[in-house]
Image: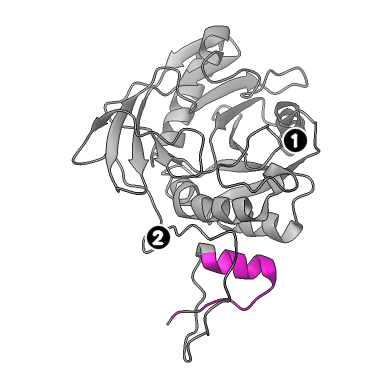
Amino acid sequence: MGTALKKYTAIRYNTATGFNPSQWDGQGRANLDPVWLVERLALFDTYCAPSLESQTLKDFCVLIAFDADTHENYIRTVCDCVKGVETKPVLIDAGANYNDRFNAFVQDDTDAEFVALTRLDSDDALAPDFMERVDHYARREIEKGLEEPLYIAFPHGQNFDTATRRYTRHEYAASAFGTLVERRAPAMKGVYSEGHTKIATRYNTVVAASKSAQWCIVIHDNNAANVLRGKPVVEPSFTVGRPGVDIQRPNRKESKPKQVAQGLTIAPRTAGNAIRFLLGRPMQLRK
């Protein structure tokens, strides 16, 4: 019988973490800004969600943390982006600690003896075998007599620039892509208990050795780390992006939607259609 281990990816989608979107107009609460939410939905659906769908090992659950005041239609739309993998929303009240909420959610969600939570930003991507590696290292260390909490560090990654379509090799010992393995208990620490630059120094740590990139930071014009880092590569370890989808950043002043062409039957998942959905307008269809 295998070790009782439940794996999660924990995504802080639009929790109130103090960020200011680069395109924010200063009105209302930044993490509920409707244009930012539309832009983030397009990024999540184009880059993050496909990387979760393509995991070679799919016995994990995606936890997506939302501000509790986020519209339920939007929450449902985001969760529906990930196909074939269990996905659950975690609602965070303004001012609440999202790490504590993730931990509390896990207590009620599983009866597994051990849990593994992986940090992931909603605009970034994981290599197809990332969760398989998490499973390997977590079970190996548990079977050896886990000195917990155990942090699995993934220093080998890459960047992708959406503007130039360029990839770079990015080696980062303190990368934000890591997994904390713990015995499930109310007193567990949680993967967001420390910043990613410090967590490996706080807990027992193993490094997931790899010659290929295990994660990808997507560089775009509305994120905090929008500088392409690392050495250019001709062939990336893995490619990112949902086939046939291009990101188009919507303007703050929304123009009237174009006339829907006749004879079209399928609505593609695009930023424009996300805006139409949120505004209650008809979707623009395609053949």
Give the number of the disc on residue 246: 2
Read off the magenta span. Answer: 272-286
Count of numbered tags: 2
Give the number of the disc on residue 46: none
Question: Where 150 sits versus 64, above or below?
Answer: above
At x 75%, y 47%, the residue is 28
Along the line of sight, the residue nearer the viewer: 187 or 162: 162
* In the image: residue 89, left or right of residue 244: right
Asked where in the image residue 257 lies, by quadrant, the reply is: bottom right
* In the image: residue 72, left or right of residue 112: right
Secondary structure at badge 2 equals loop
Q: Which kind of residue does numbered mark 2 sit on?
A: Asp
Point out residue 116 in the picture as x, y percentages from the top left corner.
58, 28
Along the line of sight, the residue nearer the viewer: 100 or 139: 100
206 in the magenta segment: no
273 in the magenta segment: yes
At x 57%, y 71%, the residue is 255
Q: Which kind of residue does numbered mark 1 sit on?
A: Phe
Instruction: For label 1, count other residues whose C-alpha is less than 10 Å away and answer few (under 14), some (14-19) or many (20+).
Output: some
Point out the image quarter for the C terminus: bottom left
* Residue picked out by circle 1: 105
At x 41%, y 40%, the residue is 219
